[in-house]
Amino acid sequence: MKIAIIGCTHAGTAAIVNIAKLYPQAEITVYERNDNISFLSCGIALYVGGVVKDPEGLFYSSPQELSKLGVKTKMLHDVQSIDIDNKKLKVRDLSNNAVFEDTFDKLVLTVGSWPIKPNIEGINLENVLLCKNYVHSNAIIEKAKNAKNITVVGAGYIGVELVEAFESQGKNVTLIDAEDRILSKYLDKEFTDIAEHTMKNKGIKLALGEKVVAFEGEGSVSKVVTDKNEYETDLAILCIGFRPNTDLVKDQVEMLGNGAIKVDEYMRTSREDVFAGGDSTAIIYNPTNEHRYIPLATNAVRMGTLIARNLVKPTTKYIGTQGTSGIKIYEHNIASTGLTEHSAKIADLDVKTVTIKDNNRPEFMPMYEQATIKLVFEANSKKILGAQIISNIDLTQYMNTMSVVIQNNMTIEELAFVDFFFQPHFNKPWNLLNTAALSALDI
């Protein structure tokens, strides 16, 4: 069996390692256009902020490790075209520009994503940078050394983490986003308001509800222009979002409108013997039971592992995702899973919500902290669709529990009386999740 794998970050690495273990006799070839693999891009802000001193820790595998498994590891090789009908690839060796063909019996597409780079004036000026991979992170660190004013465009997870990292280094930081609040895809307003308040108090300028229309400067960027204001800057970093790297198989496999490859529960595409996973892929989002593009490292490693298990025959189903994620913004520990109230209404779902504030431990204990939890649930069925938490101590694991709750279609009534332990060092007789659900019973 001849297996070709294109792309080697999270999903690709997981697929390769597991395929090599399950099918040691297979001929496995991986094509990767970069000179490194398995970079944890979620650690970029920690690296930029100096929390991570040794960037080697952001890699959990290497071409050498894959080669030890008997995998033909073709680094600096760019796949130019894919012919699924005839099971052929055309590849360019970037080290010498030689072009050659290869064939496959099974094809694994783990081609990842790339930052969105809008076609606006001045976008190609010096010091307007992308933020995705190891090369980008090193460029950001180097350019930031001599930058006094730094502008980050995009208030998703990476953008928010970057502005905190720069502020901690004494930079003058501006965060711009077309939405009227940060992290709008992940949290409702009452949660983002808390984080925004802290960021403003730290001196970060929030330019929300503003769309960038141009970058200006002589050779190097010196100003970011929005539809409402202008901001002096020495360095601008684009964190607008990502698009799937799927042009190679356009019109050959079924995709969403944004180019994300649709896969079934066994990671199979619409074409036989072609599998896909990771940031190039659309998977089932359980709260709405539809294909969605949710580029998270957690989803990617699961999908890569499942590709290996289902490569020869359908064996292990992917049970879908809730898009569970978390972030730390200064002292705030924040996590969410499933739908927010805002996203549920956009999806035209009839939902109700409950929000509680309670201490994590009994008040007779010498130390306790307040947490805010919000549940989103269907109005009629009471099925839980989403949850969010914020606190100044780390209680984010509650959202992993809520992910399982949503995964298993549990209702408010079931969560209210589910069995959680009590011990004063850790919680109250009624667990915070019990308390939230009990509060929702009569809504």
Image (cartoon, grey):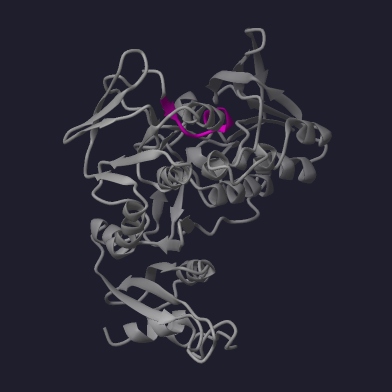
Q: In which quarter of the image is residue 226?
A: top left
**Depth order, front residue of 165/55:** 165
Q: Residue 433 versus residue 148: which sits nearer the camera?
A: 148
Res 101 → quadrant: top right
* The N terminus: image quadrant: top right
Q: Is 282 on the left or on the right of 5, as rendered?
A: left
Quarter the C terminus occupies: bottom left
Give the percent coordinates (x, y) of residue 252.
46, 28
In the image as oriented, which residue stretches furthest toward the left? 228
| Magenta highlight range | 128-136
The verdict on residue 141 being magenta is no
- Determine which quarter of the picture holds residue 238: top left
Residue at 58% over, 42% down: 50
Q: In this view, does 210 lie to the left or right of 423?
A: left
- Tell me residue 136's x, y (percent): 52, 29
The residue positioned 27% from the left and 57% from the top of the image is 347
Residue 13 image point, x, y percent: 67, 39
Residue 204 x %, y %: 34, 46
Q: Nearer the viewer, residue 239 or 283?
A: 239
